[in-house]
Amino acid sequence: MRLCSIASGSSGNCIYIGDGKSHLLIDTGISKKRVEEGLRKLDVKGEELDGIFVTHEHIDHIQGLGVFCRKYKTPVYATRGTIEGIKKCSSIGKLPEGILHEIEVDRAVELGSLTVHPFAISHDANEPCGYRAQSGGKAVAVATDLGTYDAYTVENLKALDAVVLEANHDIHMLEVGPYPYPLKRRVMGEKGHLSNELSGRLLCDILHDGLKSVMLGHLSKENNYAELAYETVKLEISLGDNPYRGEDIPITVAKRDEVSGVIEL
């Protein structure tokens, strides 16, 4: 099984998950060209994709959806609320008839050899969700764009082999940064984004000996940087109520505008 970030950040998101037989994307918030370039590095063709799962309708997650789907006719899976949001987004253009497939949180979707479990997340969108994918006894998940988490979130992220987890902002950088006050409140709110500290605390709740790789994602360009996110999350693990230290966990940071290293499981 493979997990790879093609792009991850406030300017665009696209994550690949596959197992050699089936291939899917989580979001297409970058241009068709950049999606194709990312897939090429993974030796996957656009026409080989079995589906695109959309987390929510914000433009940094669907920007390239229309152009990509008009070329490849890839099936798109999303919750009812997200589909409504996609249909209202005029900037992506008209999608081909019949490619939008409604899914429900907590109800698994079989896609070839992959089983995909959508789970609800807390974000200021119509009906956002994260995704857990399983194949051949391996499990990975993508959990970004969530302002808070609870026992339900933790349950959906347990027993993973790898995870892409949001570490959006450093609280101090956000507080003193250029964002207007209402936007700062939105980002820090329960329907906003996880800070580095909260990301580390959530990670403490899902750590286990079988977790082989953690990729921090969706970093803010204005309110975070890779080294800070990495060190803060490591520190939260070391200080947390768990038997691990930050150095024990293989942690990387997803690049905003290019393909990150492939996680092979």
Image: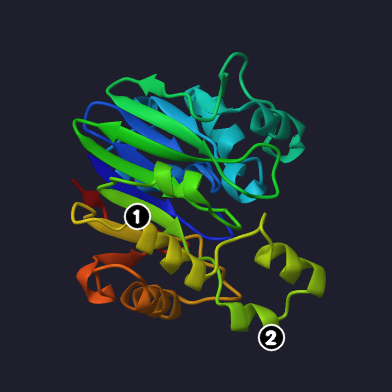
Disc 2 element = helix
Q: Residues within 10 Å of mark 1 (few under 14, many from 20)?
A: some
Q: Residues within 10 Å of mark 2 (few under 14, many from 20)?
A: few
Q: Amino acid at mark 1?
A: Ile
Q: Is residue 34 visible?
A: no
Q: Residue at x 51, y 41 (%)?
A: 27
Residue 186 rendering spot, x and y as whole percentages: 73, 63
Who comes first in sequence, dot 1 or dot 2?
2
Q: Residue at x 52, y 42 (%)?
A: 28
Q: Amino acid at mark 2?
A: Val
Quadrant containing the N terminus is: top left
Quadrant containing the C terminus is: top left
Write down the residue under mark 2.
176
Judge depth for marks 1 and 2 and give the one in front: 1
Q: CA distance from mark 1 to mark 2?
A: 31 Å
Using the image, determine if residue 125 lies above or below residue 248: above
Disc 1 element = helix
Residue 183 rendering spot, x and y as whole percentages: 76, 67
Residue 52 rendering spot, x and y as whole percentages: 47, 32
Q: Residue at x 49, y 72 (%)?
A: 197
What numbered label is drawn on residue 206? 1
Residue 151 rendering spot, x and y as whole percentages: 48, 49
